Image (tube, rainbow, N blue to C red):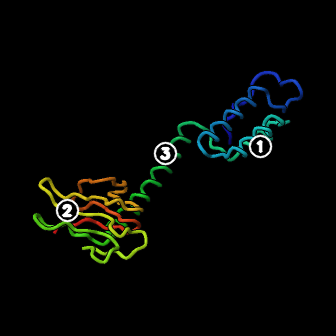
């Protein structure tokens, strides 16, 4: 059940079932690996380390390590598989969320900029407390569309990254003004 190597040779001093120093060192190494990989908290690591050092039998060592997977190809494969499944569910949730966001039509070339904010004179008035009165401006220039944050308190984000100043945007980008998110669409 654990990755402790079987004993060979004569019984260690203190009894036939008493763990050797090498077995204790191996058990401590497994605990360090468990703490390093985030499987054990610091307090749990300290407590289990004390149990390993005080163990009077091999069974006590096995009990301390029973819930830690043995390092090796199978353990690494299991961790990698769990990581991939977790990242897939995150990507799936993000894709689902992205398609359900309301669309925000990009301004036409030569048109006036689209002012976004909570103020009554805004072209896109968002009455959410997380949106600043003059939050952002979306305009078309010679190179394409540009989103400019106007010093908003809660920030303007494009594809999850906060905008400071201006940044180019294109159809399909996710934009957020405070806590309100939209998917940009071509007009």
Towards the viewer: 50 or 175: 175
Towards the viewer: 186 or 83: 186
Tell me residue 145's x, y (percent): 19, 58
Towards the viewer: 57 or 127: 127
Which of marks 3 and 1 precedes in the sequence?
Answer: 1
Tell me residue 141's x, y (percent): 14, 57
Q: Would you name the residue on which mark 3 appears? A: 80
Q: Would you name the residue on which mark 1 appears? A: 47
State the residue at coordinates (37%, 62%): 152
Q: Residues within 10 Å of mark 2 (few under 14, many from 20)?
A: many
Marks 2 and 1, how far apart at CA: 60 Å
Marks 1 and 3, how far apart at CA: 28 Å
Which of marks 2 and 3 precedes in the sequence?
Answer: 3
Q: Which quarter of the figure has residue 74? A: top right
Picture disc at residue 139: 2
Q: Residues within 10 Å of mark 3 (few under 14, many from 20)?
A: few
State the residue at coordinates (33%, 57%): 159
State the residue at coordinates (22%, 68%): 114
Q: Secondary structure at mark 3?
A: helix
Q: Secondary structure at mark 1?
A: helix
Name the mark nearer the viewer: 2 or 1.
2
Is the N terminus in the top left, top right, bottom left or bottom right quadrant? top right
State the residue at coordinates (14%, 53%): 143
Report the residue that reaches farthest toward the top.
9
Residues at circles 3 and 2 in contact by the CB criterion of under 8 Å: no
């Amino acid at each position: 059940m654990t990755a402790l190597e079987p004993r060979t040779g004569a019984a260690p001093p203190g009894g036939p079932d008493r763990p050797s120093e090498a077995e204790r060192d191996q058990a401590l190494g497994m605990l360090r690996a468990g703490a390093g990989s985030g499987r054990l908290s610091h307090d749990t690591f300290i407590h289990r380390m004390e149990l390993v050092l005080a163990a009077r039998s091999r069974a006590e060592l096995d009990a301390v390590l029973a819930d830690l997977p043995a390092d090796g190809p199978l353990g690494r494969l299991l961790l990698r598989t769990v990581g991939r499944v977790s990242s897939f569910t995150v990507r799936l949730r993000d894709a689902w969320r992205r398609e359900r966001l309301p669309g925000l039509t990009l301004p036409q070339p030569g048109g006036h900029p689209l002012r976004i904010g909570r103020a009554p004179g805004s072209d896109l008035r968002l009455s959410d407390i997380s949106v600043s009165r003059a939050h952002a401006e979306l305009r078309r220039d010679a190179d394409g569309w540009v989103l400019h944050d106007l010093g908003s308190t809660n920030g303007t984000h494009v594809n999850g990254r906060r905008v400071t100043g201006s940044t180019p945007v294109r159809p399909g980008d996710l934009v957020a003004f405070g806590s309100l998110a939209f998917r940009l669409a071509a007009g």
